[in-house]
Amino acid sequence: MKTYFHYFLALGMLITGSVNTLSTKWADQQCAVGAYGDHKHLFVHPFVQSAGMFLGEALCLVAFLLLIWRAAATKTPLDRAKPFNRLLLAIPAAHDMCATSVMYIGLALTTASAFQMLRGSVVIFTALFSVIFLKRKQYLFHWIGVVLVALGCVCVGVAGLVSTNKAQQDDYPNMTIGNIIIIVAQIIVASQMVIEERLVSGFDIPALEVVGFEGLWGMILLSLALIAMFYIPKPAVFCPTVEGNCGAKCNMDHFEDPIDAFAQMGNNVIIPIATLGNVLSIAGFNFFGISVTKHLNAATRMVLDSVRTIVIWAVSVAVGWDVIHLDDPGFWTQLAGFFILLLGTVVYNSIVRIPYVWYPEEDAATKATAINAGGMGDEMEGGLLEGDALAGEPVGAESPAFGLAGQSAFANTPSGVMGRASLIKKR
């Protein structure tokens, strides 16, 4: 029976997840004087925004330490079996750094709604990688889901090409490039999931600790990368508009310029507010996401992530970032793409079952019935995060797979195997 607490968790995840994408896009829309000269230009700093995302993840480590302190104060026993070298989490953190930064580049070039939808393409690559690298079998319903997701991504991707919305074409002349960049980033996300699965499988690592340490290592690695990127010119294609409302598209002298970014923050109060929203929302989204998976189930989280896409689209329309013209074929193409993406995701996770298609747990259920009939005991069920948040469970334990926005992954079945860190994250 659901309680008000469960509704609070679901609403918290929905709000923080939506704010995360919207706040980043809000910052992208801002014009401000930077560190060089007195001309205004767009705030196009995807790597600085990625640093904010990692800071938000690192806050989860603070929350984890507070939970440890509370457990120690109440003398709650902690099960911390089988030590794990947290420095190894720097490897998936490096992938996370690349994926997030590349996605934020794409976000600057396309709409927030298209960005959120295209992130669902990670299902395609995780399915392929699970077969190639993890040697996991994918069944017919998985591949049907993958095909539907691919078709949905194609619809969303070409919506800008068939659109007759002149205003949108002027605002996002490189929308197709941005969409492709977002899809390419999902390859990095999928490889990150494979690495996390390989690294932490079999270890008892609490979810908040994994996210927190990846945030910490990500901040350190990105800080070093920012030094190198300061001396690399920015390709013109990575600037979102030709002229825009600023008189200049963006700073072209540096691939990333944190000095210019902080100067723009000081000259436009909206930018630091949006950046703070990004930091706090990613911390809250991870916390609420873990809690939803623990107290409800991962299928609920997948549904909420799908609703998040609708919220982002609705807000984008309300504030004028997206303009709907019912006679625009691009709008209907994107709308169709969203529903096909959603259908592909729920089919892949067997939330919607296709008639006359075999599902492997049918055999498992038959075997469980036979065992119970023989007096061998009940089949144990449970989500990945149903235990104590501090004690954790072995990463790789059975858990529901989910996710339009990147959480669906390596499960062979809805109760398949996947690393904890990949399940609980991210943006």
Image (cartoon, helix red, strand yellow):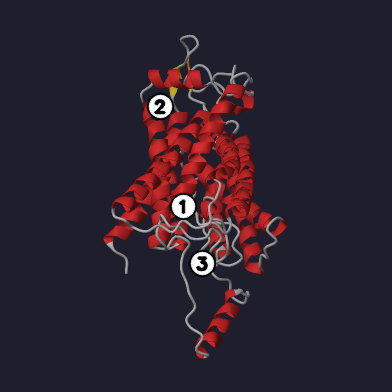
Q: CA distance from mark 2 to mark 1?
A: 31 Å
**Label 1 SS:** helix
Give the number of the disc on residue 207: 1
Question: 38 or 135: which is nearer to us?
Answer: 135
Query: What residue is rendered at 44% in x and 21% in y?
Result: 262
Task: Say if 110 sits above or below 349 in the image.
Answer: above
**Label 2 SS:** helix
Res 169 seen here: no
Number of other residues with Cα within 10 Å of mark 3, as a class: few under 14, some 14 to 19, many 20 or more: some
Task: Say if 414 sits above or below 97 in the image.
Answer: below
Query: What residue is rendered at 56% in x and 35% in y?
Result: 101
**Which corner quadrant of the image does residue 243 belong to?**
top right
Q: CA distance from mark 2 to mark 3?
A: 40 Å
**Which corner quadrant of the image does residue 293 belong to?**
bottom left
* Percent of width and height locating residue 378: 47, 81
Number of labels in the image equals 3
Question: 92 or 411: which is nearer to us?
Answer: 92
Query: What residue is rendered at 46% in x and 38% in y?
Result: 322
Q: Is residue 83 left or right of residue 385?
A: right
Give the number of the disc on residue 384: none
Number of other residues with Cα within 10 Å of mark 1, as a class: few under 14, some 14 to 19, many 20 or more: many
Please identify, in this view, whether the residue under mark 3 or under mark 1 is nearer the observer: 1
The residue carrying mark 2 is 271
* Percent of width and height locating residue 46: 53, 30
The residue carrying mark 3 is 351
Q: Is residue 367 left or right of residue 23?
A: right
Q: CA distance from mark 3 to mark 1?
A: 25 Å
Amino acid type, mark 1: Ala
Amino acid type, mark 2: Ile
